[in-house]
Image (spheres, rainbow, N blue to C red):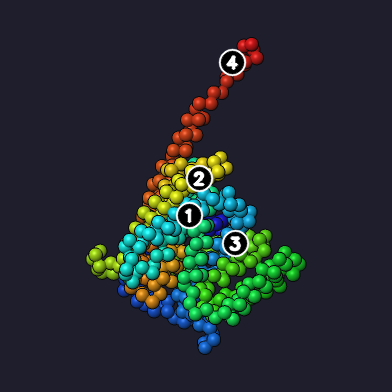
Amino acid sequence: MSLLRSARFPAIILLVAAAAALIIANTAAGPALDDFMHVYLGIPGVFELSIEHWIKDGLLAIFFFVVAVELQFELTNGELNSARKALQPAIAAAGGVIVPIAVFLVFAAGSPAAGGWPIPTATDIAFALGVLAVFGKGLPSGIRIFLLALAILDDIVGIIFIAVLFTTDVNIGLLALAALAVIAFGVLSRFLDSRAKAGVGVLLVALAVIAWALTYLSGVHATIAGVALGLAMYQRPALQVRHALEPWVNGLVLPLFAFSAALVVIPAVSPTELSPAFWGVLVALPVGKIIGISLFGWISLRIGARGRAPHLSFADLLAAGALGGIGFTVSLLLSELAFSDLPEIRDQATLGVLAGSVISLVIAAVLVSMRARHFRRVRDIDADEVEVPSPSSPDRGQLA
């Protein structure tokens, strides 16, 4: 389980799952696997979803619950618990949203693909921290804190996009009942440390399932239920539940989602025939994120309160921007939602997410390695300059 809680291994699993799905989808076994993903499971006539939707709407809600618990902690006790702490990463995150959207629309404006503009706005925390763990040995903690805050803010933006842009024909009554279930869940979670822990736990699971089902039936994307439950849960038990769920999310939920989302047939067309959605996402993730985060991050260093936030150079911001371009999980979900009625464009946008994220990953690995070597070299120089007096050397008192 400790391996699944590490920063490196889950990122490797995600990459392998996506690669395996892409390979299988383009073999003779692809159609059969696609048919299997569309098999319906549930209570006939009452509540049924395809296997694909159980993964994307059901299991992924658990991932968003874990993300929301982390958001709750960071906003109350962590790196975003004050405007001063959040200022620099918030400005950089704004650049990491605005510029990729602009880059995407350069390719897609005026075409049916234009609706995919939210896709390149996301950052995958698991991948970004995995790259830092593998290639960033020796980096100051300030860079990691900045990146974590940046990725969390990106997640908030992604959640808002999902809630606002991809919600249609909302049933207010069912949504109100879902909200009541979330409130009851939050109140009851305060008693999770009592002697009736087992009974409370069962009730919490039942309320969570009810809230999720009501949210789904209301027309709001079901993953929003996971967000609401994570934010509503009392913090101490929420952190304990997050710790328990983390290996399952990293080892099962996210790989299954990556596998199902990457089941895409590579179109046998020339590059000029590819959708603007493909080119927009492919360029917006690495280029848009690097430009947006580094430029707006540099601006934040000029207007922020100096001496109060971790010092970051422009080279550090370039590395953070490259890490921010690893969209993957949330970008894949946004691709599914943006083009749910246009499967051909959706598949090409998915390929753009995969290719753009891999390009960002490679660039980030290079830039992070360079920054890590720089800081290790600086520390070695500083260590060499420290003079250690020998036992036989007279001290200042003797010389006096």
User: 92 left or right of 175?
Assistant: left
The amino acid pointed to by label 3 is Val
Residue located beneath label 3 in the image: 69
The kind of residue tagged 1 is: Ala
Marks 2/4: CA–CA distance: 49 Å
Q: Which residue is mark 1?
A: 93
- Where disc 4 sits, the SS reads loop
Residue 136 picture location, percent across and down: 47, 46
Left or right for 309, reference 292 = right
Residue 269 position within the rendered picture, expressed as x and y whole percent measured from the top left? 24, 68
Q: CA distance from mark 1 to mark 2?
A: 15 Å
Give the mark toward the camera: 1 or 4: 1
Residue with the mark numbered 4: 393
Real-space CA distance between mark 1 and mark 4, rounded to the nearest whole angstrom? 55 Å
Q: Is residue 341 above or below residue 138?
A: below
- Tell which of 254 and 306 is nearer to you: 306
Cβ atoms under marks 1 and 2 closer than 8 Å: no
Instruction: Tell me whether circle 1 and circle 4 mark residues in contact (CB < 8 Å).
Output: no
Q: Which mark is residue 303?
A: 2
Instruction: State how far apart marks 1 and 3 are (Cα).
Output: 20 Å
Q: Earlier in the sequence, mark 1 or mark 4?
A: 1
Task: Tell me what residue is drawn at x 61 percent, y 64 percent.
Answer: 231
- Mark nearest the camera among 1 and 2 is 2
Residue at the front extreme, as displayed? 303
User: Taking 23 as reference, is 94 above or below it?
Assistant: above
The percent position of residue 297, horizontal first and vertical second, equals: 46, 48
Q: Which of the marked residues, 4 or 3, is nearer the chain's N terminus?
A: 3
Mark 2–mark 4 CB contact (< 8 Å):
no
